[in-house]
């Protein structure tokens, strides 16, 4: 028996996505949200649906070829994100004198890079490519390093095991059937480098058995 669900879409951003789940404004959040132990203290997550890494988008032709070249430069990050934490960790680990500037959302970050207010903008690599494509930025390039591992999943309310099981059951069927390959190709294939290097691993482990 097929059940038709009525879906209400709730717009959120990097700042409001957790609040929407915690206060039950929304039942799930589907975005590029990384699973972390600190976040599991306030929300729950589905099985991993994608895997990414933190990258840095820079203007081309500026001699910025590696993350080490960001010494003395300004790097934009989104406040409160795992990407911001990864950049700070890498700057400290490599003892770079880079200045980290926080913005409220990704649109502000990409706009600052386009204007030349910052030398680099750090976020999920695929997100950076999509933002540059949407803004029609032609003179940008991604630095080659992966600065972190970012396992992405659907954010869910804490404590509702039945809802989490229902979400994971549906996801497992999509992965096991191979339907996920077509979905990835349809929505991500046209964005620069396409899917991440970890996509194949996600394909395998996403297909949980019944």
Image (cartoon, rainbow, N blue to C red):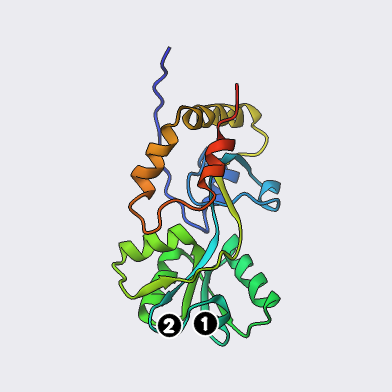
Residue 194's mark? Answer: none
Question: Residue visible at 50% across and 64% down?
Answer: 123
Q: Which residue is mark 2?
A: 117
Q: CA distance from mark 1 to mark 2?
A: 8 Å
In primary-sequence order, the first of circles 1 and 2 is 1
**Can the viewer see residue 131 in this picture?**
yes
- Residues tagged 1 and 2 counted as in contact (Cβ below 8 A): yes
Q: Eyeballing the image, is 186 above or below 64?
A: above
Percent coordinates x, y for residue 8 in the rendering? 40, 37
Q: How many marks?
A: 2
Question: Residue visible at 31% across and 66% down?
Answer: 135
Instruction: Give the structural element (helix, strand or loop) at label 1.
Output: strand
Q: Which residue is mark 1?
A: 74
Q: Eyeballing the image, is 102 above or below 7?
A: below
> Which quadrant holds the N terminus?
top left
**Can the viewer see residue 154 in this picture?**
no
Toward the viewer: 181 or 59? 181
Q: Residues within 10 Å of mark 1 (few under 14, many from 20)?
A: some
To which quarter of the image does residue 71 belong?
Answer: bottom right
Toward the viewer: 106 or 23? 106
> Which quadrant holds the C terminus?
top right
């Amino acid at each position: 028996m097929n059940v038709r669900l009525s879906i209400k879409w709730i717009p959120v951003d990097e700042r409001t996505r957790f609040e929407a789940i915690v206060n039950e404004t929304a039942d799930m959040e589907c975005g590029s949200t990384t699973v972390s132990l600190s976040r599991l203290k306030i929300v729950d997550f589905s099985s991993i649906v994608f895997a990414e890494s933190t990258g840095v988008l820079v203007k081309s032709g500026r001699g910025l070829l590696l993350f080490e070249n960001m010494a003395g430069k300004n790097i934009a990050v989104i406040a409160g994100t795992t990407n911001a934490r990864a950049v700070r960790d890498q700057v400290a680990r490599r003892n770079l004198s880079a200045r980290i500037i926080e913005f409220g959302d990704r649109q502000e970050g990409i706009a600052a890079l386009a204007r030349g207010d910052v030398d680099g903008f750090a976020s999920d690599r695929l997100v950076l490519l999509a933002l540059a494509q949407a803004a029609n930025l032609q003179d940008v390039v991604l630095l080659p390093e992966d600065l972190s591992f970012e396992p992405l999943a659907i954010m869910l309310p804490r404590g509702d095991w039945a809802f989490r099981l229902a979400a994971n059951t549906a996801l497992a069927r999509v992965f096991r059937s191979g339907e996920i390959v077509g979905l990835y190709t349809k929505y991500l294939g046209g964005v620069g480098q396409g899917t991440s290097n970890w996509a194949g691993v996600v394909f395998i482990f996403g297909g949980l058995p019944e």
